[in-house]
């Protein structure tokens, strides 16, 4: 039976055979991903270990690491909470202009990042529509970086959690309520375990997107060294100074650190799915 099903699948497959499809996939990934990343590492290897260490641990660079990774993690964490809330409202409730609100979630995807940065700066500047009423400064401060990264990361969480919520069976919630569970207990023990893998995926996507964000941040950040200068801007600055090896060295540190963090998140996600399957 298995041989027959495999034969029929191969016969009626729209895509080419496995070997050919795998070859094209690996070739495409190699050209788009592996070759550029290899170039970054190869350029970095032109530095001696001492020069590399001095470049990536300079006080200005370390300050940009703290700002970039700290605000990216905080923005992704906030988006995980409120992205879940937005997805819940869009799936579970009916209200006027629901489709308009649903379309607005994708606005950071469609809006050019530079336009988003200018718009956020105009809103949160000292004389902006929102900034003039705030008792603290947002624009040209690290808080402005956090606002920009939160803006561009929200859709990743919403669009990742939303399909899972739509497929979630309401009978499970009704059964929990019949057994005497409160709303909080139902959410904690029935809904949240099902949503955890998707929520972690959305968090990882928002975090990864925030790490490499440039266009929407440079306008609202103020770009003050040691205060509000993000690492991508520092890389661009070194490229403009023709310090290509220094730029790639910082990029390698960002790449390796981001990869390790995303790997840890994926391991937690796999553990959550495995635990959910056993439950």
Image (tube, helix red, strand yellow):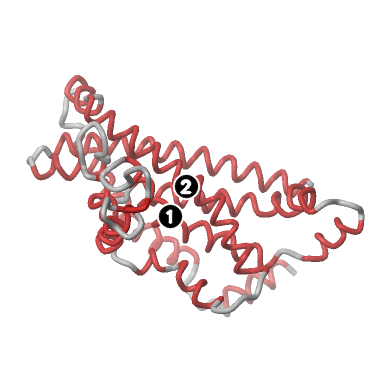
In the picture, which quadrant includes the N terminus?
bottom right
Residue 227 occupies which quadrant of the picture?
top left
Identify the residue at horizontal 86%, vertical 57% (top origin). Answer: 177
Which element carries disc 2, helix, strand or loop? Answer: helix
Name the residue furthest right.
179
Residue 136 drawn above or below residue 112: above
Q: Residues within 10 Å of mark 1 (few under 14, many from 20)?
A: many
Q: Position of residue 64 (x, y in %)?
A: 28, 35
Total marks shown come to: 2
Real-space CA distance between mark 1 and mark 2, rounded to the nearest whole angstrom: 7 Å
Q: Position of residue 27 (x, y in %)?
A: 34, 59
Which residue is identified by label 2?
76
User: Residue placed at 29% from the left, 62% from the top?
Assistant: 119
Res 222 quadrant in image: top left
Marks 1/2 in contact by CB < 8 Å: the verdict is: yes
The percent coordinates of residue 24 (x first, y second) are: 38, 64
Figure check: 17 above or below 160: below
List x then y, in percent, for residue 124.
32, 54
Residue at position x 81%, y 60% in the image: 173
Residue named by callout 1: 153
Against 195, residue 258 (above or below) is above
Local packing at callout 2 (Cα closer than 10 Å; few below 14, some 14-19, many 20+) is: many
Q: Is residue 132 left or right of residue 206?
A: left
């Amino acid at each position: 039976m298995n041989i027959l099903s495999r034969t029929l699948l191969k016969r009626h497959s729209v895509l080419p055979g496995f070997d050919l499809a795998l070859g094209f996939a690996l070739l495409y990934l190699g050209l788009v991903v592996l070759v550029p990343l290899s170039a970054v590492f190869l350029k970095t290897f032109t530095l001696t270990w001492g020069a590399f260490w001095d470049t990536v641990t300079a006080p200005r660079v370390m300050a940009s690491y703290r700002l970039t990774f700290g605000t990216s993690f905080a923005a992704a964490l906030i988006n995980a909470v409120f992205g879940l809330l937005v997805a819940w409202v869009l799936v579970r409730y009916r209200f006027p202009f629901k489709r308009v609100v649903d379309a607005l979630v994708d606005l950071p995807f469609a809006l050019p990042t530079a336009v988003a940065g200018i718009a956020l700066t105009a809103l949160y500047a000292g004389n902006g529509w929102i900034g003039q009423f705030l008792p603290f400064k947002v624009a040209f401060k690290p808080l402005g970086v956090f606002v920009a990264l939160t803006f561009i990361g929200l859709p990743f969480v919403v669009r990742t959690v939303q399909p899972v919520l739509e497929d979630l069976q309401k009978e499970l919630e009704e059964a929990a309520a019949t057994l005497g569970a409160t709303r909080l207990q139902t959410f904690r023990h029935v809904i949240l375990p099902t949503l955890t893998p998707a929520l972690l995926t959305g968090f990882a996507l928002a975090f990864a997107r925030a790490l490499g964000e440039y266009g929407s941040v440079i306008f609202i950040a103020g770009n003050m060294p040691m205060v509000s200068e993000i690492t991508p801007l520092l890389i661009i600055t070194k490229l403009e100074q023709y310090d290509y090896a220094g730029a790639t060295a910082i990029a390698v540190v960002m790449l390796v650190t981001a990869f390790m963090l995303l790997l840890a998140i994926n391991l937690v996600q796999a553990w959550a799915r495995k635990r959910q399957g056993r439950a």
